[in-house]
Amino acid sequence: MRNYHHFVQDIITACEKIVRFVENMDFEQFSKDEKTVDAVIRNLEIIGEATRKIPDSVKERYNNIDWPAIIGMRNIIIHEYFGVDLEEIWKTIKEDIPALKLSVKKLLSN
Protein backbone atom coordinates (compact mmCIF):
# COMPACT_ATOMS: atom_id res chain seq x y z
CA MET A 1 0.00 0.00 0.00
CA ARG A 2 1.24 3.48 -0.83
CA ASN A 3 1.71 5.96 1.97
CA TYR A 4 1.35 9.69 1.55
CA HIS A 5 5.07 10.11 0.83
CA HIS A 6 4.52 8.30 -2.47
CA PHE A 7 1.75 10.72 -3.42
CA VAL A 8 3.94 13.67 -2.50
CA GLN A 9 6.66 12.25 -4.74
CA ASP A 10 4.09 11.91 -7.54
CA ILE A 11 3.37 15.64 -7.15
CA ILE A 12 7.06 16.51 -7.33
CA THR A 13 7.57 14.34 -10.41
CA ALA A 14 4.54 15.86 -12.16
CA CYS A 15 5.78 19.39 -11.36
CA GLU A 16 9.19 18.56 -12.82
CA LYS A 17 7.62 17.16 -15.97
CA ILE A 18 5.41 20.21 -16.45
CA VAL A 19 8.37 22.57 -16.13
CA ARG A 20 10.38 20.44 -18.55
CA PHE A 21 7.52 20.24 -21.08
CA VAL A 22 7.20 24.03 -21.37
CA GLU A 23 10.90 24.84 -21.17
CA ASN A 24 11.84 27.56 -23.68
CA MET A 25 8.19 28.16 -24.61
CA ASP A 26 6.09 31.27 -24.32
CA PHE A 27 2.32 31.21 -23.96
CA GLU A 28 1.67 31.42 -27.69
CA GLN A 29 3.91 28.44 -28.43
CA PHE A 30 2.38 26.48 -25.56
CA SER A 31 -1.21 27.18 -26.59
CA LYS A 32 -0.54 26.03 -30.16
CA ASP A 33 1.29 22.84 -29.17
CA GLU A 34 -1.46 20.27 -28.68
CA LYS A 35 0.85 17.56 -27.35
CA THR A 36 2.38 19.84 -24.75
CA VAL A 37 -1.01 21.15 -23.65
CA ASP A 38 -2.28 17.58 -23.25
CA ALA A 39 0.86 16.49 -21.39
CA VAL A 40 0.67 19.43 -19.00
CA ILE A 41 -3.04 18.90 -18.35
CA ARG A 42 -2.44 15.21 -17.66
CA ASN A 43 0.23 16.05 -15.10
CA LEU A 44 -2.02 18.65 -13.47
CA GLU A 45 -4.59 15.85 -13.16
CA ILE A 46 -1.95 13.67 -11.50
CA ILE A 47 -1.10 16.46 -9.06
CA GLY A 48 -4.79 16.82 -8.19
CA GLU A 49 -5.35 13.09 -7.78
CA ALA A 50 -2.24 12.68 -5.63
CA THR A 51 -3.36 15.63 -3.50
CA ARG A 52 -6.72 13.97 -2.91
CA LYS A 53 -4.91 10.90 -1.54
CA ILE A 54 -2.88 12.83 1.03
CA PRO A 55 -4.49 12.50 4.48
CA ASP A 56 -6.27 15.54 5.90
CA SER A 57 -4.00 15.43 8.96
CA VAL A 58 -0.98 16.04 6.71
CA LYS A 59 -2.78 18.81 4.82
CA GLU A 60 -3.64 20.48 8.12
CA ARG A 61 -0.02 20.35 9.25
CA TYR A 62 1.15 21.87 5.96
CA ASN A 63 -1.59 24.44 5.55
CA ASN A 64 0.79 26.82 3.77
CA ILE A 65 0.01 24.77 0.65
CA ASP A 66 -3.32 25.67 -0.96
CA TRP A 67 -4.61 22.10 -1.12
CA PRO A 68 -8.21 23.11 -2.00
CA ALA A 69 -7.00 25.14 -5.01
CA ILE A 70 -5.00 22.16 -6.27
CA ILE A 71 -8.01 19.89 -6.04
CA GLY A 72 -10.17 22.62 -7.57
CA MET A 73 -7.89 22.84 -10.60
CA ARG A 74 -8.08 19.07 -10.98
CA ASN A 75 -11.89 19.19 -10.84
CA ILE A 76 -12.05 21.87 -13.53
CA ILE A 77 -9.72 19.90 -15.78
CA ILE A 78 -11.58 16.62 -15.27
CA HIS A 79 -15.17 17.84 -15.33
CA GLU A 80 -14.99 20.87 -17.60
CA TYR A 81 -12.30 19.73 -19.98
CA PHE A 82 -13.60 21.73 -22.93
CA GLY A 83 -13.86 24.81 -20.75
CA VAL A 84 -10.22 24.77 -19.67
CA ASP A 85 -8.69 28.23 -19.91
CA LEU A 86 -5.17 27.86 -21.30
CA GLU A 87 -4.17 31.27 -19.99
CA GLU A 88 -5.09 30.10 -16.49
CA ILE A 89 -3.12 26.89 -17.04
CA TRP A 90 -0.11 28.94 -18.19
CA LYS A 91 -0.37 31.17 -15.14
CA THR A 92 -0.47 28.06 -12.94
CA ILE A 93 2.61 26.66 -14.67
CA LYS A 94 4.61 29.84 -14.27
CA GLU A 95 3.43 31.01 -10.84
CA ASP A 96 2.22 28.01 -8.87
CA ILE A 97 4.07 24.90 -10.01
CA PRO A 98 7.58 25.99 -8.92
CA ALA A 99 6.29 27.07 -5.50
CA LEU A 100 4.27 23.88 -5.10
CA LYS A 101 7.30 21.76 -5.88
CA LEU A 102 9.39 23.57 -3.25
CA SER A 103 6.65 23.31 -0.63
CA VAL A 104 6.03 19.60 -1.07
CA LYS A 105 9.77 18.89 -1.13
CA LYS A 106 9.95 20.51 2.32
CA LEU A 107 7.07 18.32 3.41
CA LEU A 108 9.07 15.23 2.44
CA SER A 109 12.16 16.38 4.29
CA ASN A 110 10.28 16.81 7.61
Image: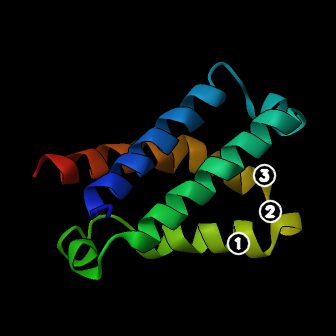
Most foreground residue, 79 or 92: 79
Q: CA distance from mark 3 to mark 2?
A: 6 Å
The answer to whether mark 3 and mark 2 are in CB contact below 8 A is: yes
Asked whether, in this view, residue 68 is left or right of residue 72, the answer is left
Which residue is farthest left?
110
Which residue is farthest top?
24
Asked whether, in this view, residue 62 is left or right of residue 71, the answer is left
Write down the residue under mark 2: 84
The answer to whether mark 3 and mark 1 are in CB contact below 8 A is: no
- Residue 46 higher or lower than 75, as above or below: above
Pointer 3 local density, CA inside 10 Å: few below 14, some 14–19, many at least 20: some
Write down the residue under mark 1: 76
When asked about the image quadrant of residue 54, the answer is bottom left
Q: CA distance from mark 2 to mark 1?
A: 7 Å
Q: Please state which amino acid type lies under the numbered disc 2.
A: Val
Q: Please state which amino acid type lies under the numbered disc 3.
A: Leu
Q: Please state the horizontal and vertical placement of residue 43, each as a whole percent of the image.
A: 60, 48
Write down the residue under mark 3: 86
